[in-house]
């Protein structure tokens, strides 16, 4: 999987440096930490939609923007640590698993269309 187009090579260098500097165990733990923070932001977003009924439109927009910005930041953190995990696990093996799972998902969706 390509990382941010043509600057991917530079990104890979930074990712490898972080793995070397902090160690694989630390970066695995960092990935878990970042995933937990993303889970919290997704939960905040889900809870927002339940609580937004009592807010004015302006209040809801401000709150939604703040939650969305926090979630975007956590998505970026998770993606960076996932790229490191892919490097540590073996990029090609992960790409093969992704391709398999995407094909399986596509097949299931096609079957759902046929059964509807």
Image (cartoon, rainbow, N blue to C red):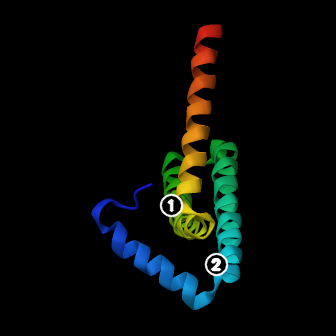
Which residue is tagged 1? 72
Q: Is residue 116 visible?
A: no
**Tag 2, which secondary structure?**
helix
Q: Position of residue 40 (x, y in %)?
A: 70, 61
Q: Position of residue 107 (x, y in %)?
A: 59, 24
Query: What is the quadrant of the N terminus in the image?
Result: bottom left
Q: Is residue 42 visible?
A: yes
**Tag 1, which secondary structure?**
helix
Count of picture labels: 2
Q: Residue at x 59, y 55 (%)?
A: 93
Mark 1 or 2: the one toward you: 2
Q: CA distance from mark 1 to mark 2?
A: 20 Å
Find residue 6 and name its label. Answer: none
Q: Residues within 10 Å of mark 1 (few under 14, many from 20)?
A: some
Q: Residue at x 68, y 74 (%)?
A: 28
Closer to us: 106 or 90 = 90
Which residue is tagged 2? 27
Ranked by sequence position, the earlier of labels 1 and 2 is 2
């Amino acid at each position: 999987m390509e990382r941010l187009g043509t600057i991917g090579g530079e990104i890979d260098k930074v990712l490898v440096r972080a793995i070397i500097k902090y160690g694989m165990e630390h970066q695995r733990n960092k990935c878990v930490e970042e995933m937990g923070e993303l889970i919290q932001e997704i939960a905040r977003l889900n809870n927002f939609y339940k609580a937004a009924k009592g807010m004015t439109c302006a209040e809801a927009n401000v709150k939604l923007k703040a939650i969305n910005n926090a979630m975007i930041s956590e998505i970026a953190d998770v993606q960076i640590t996932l790229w490191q995990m892919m490097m540590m696990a073996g990029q090609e093996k992960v790409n093969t698993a992704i391709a398999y799972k995407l094909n399986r998902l596509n097949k299931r969706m096609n079957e759902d269309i046929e059964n509807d």
